[in-house]
Image: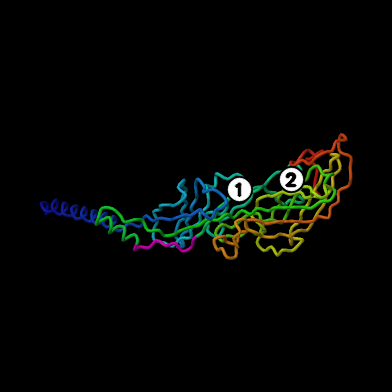
């Protein structure tokens, strides 16, 4: 018995070693992931340049899958090592840290992924209540989605077989092609004014605009914010210099989800400083029914599924029926229109009547 013990022990160790080697070889032959390719086409992110970087979010559809985040300076494609699963893919330009006027929220879940405009502290506009949020203009953001991109076990097995036969894998399978589009709208405002020769400066606020955008369902949020317009240009009629228009524009996430084009849903508040540099005229207009939608590229959004229902341009062209009173210009000069906001007295306490 004493002689057999070393022999049995050695035999047991040898069998254990062989079993271990066989397990490792099986693991090598049957990995749990494979390399795949995702193509990204930025040609519809017009009229903006191809971005210098992108973020790709992958949301596995299995209950135990983990969200994958891929950051890259290569914007035409992404090479990923993924397990067998079905994925919803979300892509947007740049990384979240490269934006200054917008914030990303809820990216850990497909249903909650969104972007919102950052709050803006004005030196002249005071919020009407604690719930009113004044925001700054969002930067351009291109977003694309693909549902049902699939990595199968057959793909994984095929890669292993190819490596065993030739020592290298075949060309990577493309599991998705994503075409991002711009989701930021431009609102252009044109207001017709009589007595425009008496106007020195203008500033305005427009409430009832969308706070943000849901990135995977591609629609504006229900939350509402106020946008300020602080830079205007003026054009006088050639035939009658006392008539003319003031114009401005700003970027936003469009009209909020559930907007019904009712006049009272959007309030435009306008404040005009006259050329005597002391007379101020305040006006308010319900304009929720006056937006017209357009696309600068000339394409019909209804026939363009890649647009995701995003309106790239909204126009508010309004004959205000404002007639400014005649005033003596400051210093007796002819005065002039200032495009930018100036110090209109004590700005910290001035509030538009809205």
Q: Nearer the viewer, residue 255 or 276?
A: 276
Furthest residue in direction front, as rendered: 239
| Residue depicted at 78% across the width and 45% down the height | 202
Task: Judge from the rendering whether residue 90 lies leftward or rightward of residue 190; answer left or right.
Answer: left
Percent x, y for residue 318? 77, 56
Disc 1 from disc 2: Cα separation:
22 Å
The residue where tag 2 is placed is 233
What colour-coding does the image apply? rainbow
Q: Which mark, by number, is residue 97?
A: none
Task: Judge from the rendering whether residue 181 lies leftward or rightward of residue 327; answer left or right.
Answer: left
Furthest residue in direction left, as rendered: 3
Percent x, y for residue 310? 61, 59
The secondary structure type at the circle numbered 1 is loop
The residue where tag 1 is placed is 139
Badge 1: few (under 14), some or many (20 or more) residues near its Cα, within 10 Å?
some
Magenta residue check for 171: no
Percent x, y for residue 350? 80, 43
Q: Main secondary structure of the magenta part?
A: strand
Q: Nearer the viewer, residue 283 or 163?
A: 283
Q: State which region is magenta.
A: 146-154
| Residue depicted at 50% across the width and 50% down the height | 55
Q: Nearer the viewer, mark 1 or mark 2?
A: 2
């Amino acid at each position: 018995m004493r002689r057999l013990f070393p022999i049995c022990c050695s035999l047991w160790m040898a069998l254990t070693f062989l079993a271990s080697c066989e397990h490792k070889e099986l693991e090598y032959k049957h990995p749990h992931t494979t390399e795949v390719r995702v193509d990204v086409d930025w040609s519809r992110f017009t009229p903006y340049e191809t971005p210098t970087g992108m973020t790709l979010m992958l949301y596995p559809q299995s209950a135990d899958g983990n969200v994958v985040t891929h950051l890259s300076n290569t914007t035409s494609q992404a090479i990923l090592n993924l397990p067998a699963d079905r994925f919803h893919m979300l892509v947007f330009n740049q990384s979240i840290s490269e934006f200054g006027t917008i914030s990303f929220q809820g990216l850990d879940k497909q249903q909650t992924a969104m972007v919102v405009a950052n709050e803006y502290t004005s030196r002249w506009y005071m919020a009407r209540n604690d719930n009113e949020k004044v925001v700054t203009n969002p930067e351009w953001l291109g977003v694309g989605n693909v549902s049902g991109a699939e990595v199968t076990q057959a793909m994984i097995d095929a890669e292993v077989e190819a490596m065993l036969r030739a020592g290298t894998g075949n060309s990577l399978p493309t599991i998705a092609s994503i075409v991002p589009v711009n989701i930021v709208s431009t609102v252009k405002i044109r207001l017709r004014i009589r007595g425009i020769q008496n106007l020195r400066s203008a500033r305005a606020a427009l409430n009832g605009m969308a706070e943000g955008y849901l990135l995977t369902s591609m629609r504006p949020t229900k939350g509402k914010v106020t946008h300020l317009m602080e830079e205007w240009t003026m054009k006088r009629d050639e035939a009658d210099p006392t008539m003319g228009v003031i114009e401005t524009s700003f970027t936003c996430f469009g009209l909020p989800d559930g907007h019904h084009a009712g006049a009272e849903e959007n309030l435009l508040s306008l404040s005009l400083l006259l050329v005597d540099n002391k007379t101020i005229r305040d006006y308010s207009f319900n304009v929720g029914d006056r937006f017209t939608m357009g696309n600068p590229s000339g394409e019909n959004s209804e026939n363009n599924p890649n647009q995701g229902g995003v309106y790239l341009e909204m126009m508010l062209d309004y004959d205000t029926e404002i007639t400014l009173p005649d005033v003596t210009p400051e210093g007796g000069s002819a005065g002039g229109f200032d495009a930018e906001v100036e110090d209109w007295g004590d700005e910290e306490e001035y509030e538009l009547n809205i």
